[in-house]
Every structure is written in C-alpha cells, then in structure tokens.
Image (cartoon, rainbow, N blue to C red):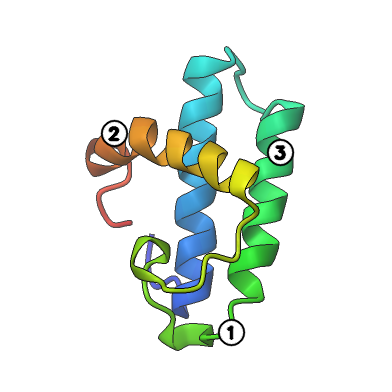
C-alpha cells in the first residue's frame, strides 16, 4: 500500500477501514456504508483533521482532550472494539 503520509491521513484511512468492516458485518452492507456509518466516518474525518495537536497528536484513547461528542464517541468505540482485532489480518500495515 505504500506510504500514507502524515499521521492524520493514516488515522483517517484506518478509521475508514474500521467503519467499513463494522458496517459490512453489523449493517449487512456490501460496497457502501449505511447512512449512520457514513455520518460517523465524515464526523471522524473532520475531528481528526481539526485536532489541535496536528501531526503530533496522541492516539485518541490517550488524549486528555476528547473532541468527539459523547454519542459519537460511543459509536466509534463500538466500531473500534469490533474492527480492531480484525484489522490485524485484513489490513496488517495499518
């Protein structure tokens, strides 16, 4: 897959893959995301891009400032809990 550039770009790509895995399994989609997962992806992309730490940002789980609204944070946590273990085999470079 090559280089992914800066940390924010890598995080957006990783979150996108995680949401896609989750949506395909939990919402039975094939080649698209459902509306709720699309909304979560767009929200996550904006929040990652607007991080006050820029490319020096810590992992969100280690950050003292939680920039996600509580309901969106709950959703991304569900996605990460489901998709995280599967990322190792599906997208090992991420």
Secondary structure at badge 2 equals helix
Residue 43 horizontal/vertical position (percent): 70, 53
| Residue at image location 23% in from the left, 37% down from the top | 89
Left or right placement of residue 32 versus residue 25 in this view: right
- Disc 1 from disc 3: Cα separation: 24 Å
Most distant residue in the top direction: 28
Secondary structure at badge 3 equals helix
Rate crowding at label 3 as few (under 14), some (14 to 19) or many (20 or more) other CA atoms within 10 Å.
some
| Residue at image location 32% in from the left, 45% down from the top | 91
Depth check, mark 1 against mark 3: the one in front is 1
Q: Is residue 27 above or below residue 58?
A: above
Q: Is residue 3 above or below residue 17?
A: below
Depth check, mark 2 against mark 1: the one in front is 1
Q: Quadrant of the N terminus?
A: bottom left
Rate crowding at label 2 as few (under 14), some (14 to 19) or many (20 or more) other CA atoms within 10 Å.
some
Residue 69 horizontal/vertical position (percent): 65, 53
- Going from N to C along the chain, the mark reached first, 1 or 3, is 3
Left or right placement of residue 93 versus residue 27 in this view: left
Secondary structure at badge 1 equals loop
Q: Which residue is mark 3?
A: 38
Q: Which residue is mark 1?
A: 52
Question: In front here: 86 or 90?
Answer: 86
Q: Which mark is residue 35?
A: none
Q: Is residue 64 above or below residue 56?
A: above
Question: In front here: 78 or 1?
Answer: 78
Residue 65 horizontal/vertical position (percent): 50, 73
Q: Quadrant of the C terminus?
A: bottom left
- Disc 2 from disc 1: Cα separation: 30 Å
Q: Are marks 2 and 1 in contact (CB under 8 Å)?
A: no
Q: Which residue is mark 2?
A: 86
């Amino acid at each position: 897959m090559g280089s992914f550039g800066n940390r924010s770009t890598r995080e957006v790509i990783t979150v996108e893959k995680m949401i896609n895995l989750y949506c395909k399994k939990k919402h039975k989609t094939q080649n698209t995301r459902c509306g709720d997962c699309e909304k979560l992806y767009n929200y996550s992309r904006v929040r990652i891009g607007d991080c006050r730490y820029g490319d020096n940002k810590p992992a969100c789980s280690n950050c003292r400032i939680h920039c996600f609204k509580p309901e969106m944070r709950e959703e991304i946590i569900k996605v990460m809990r489901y998709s995280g273990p599967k990322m190792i085999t599906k997208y090992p470079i991420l």
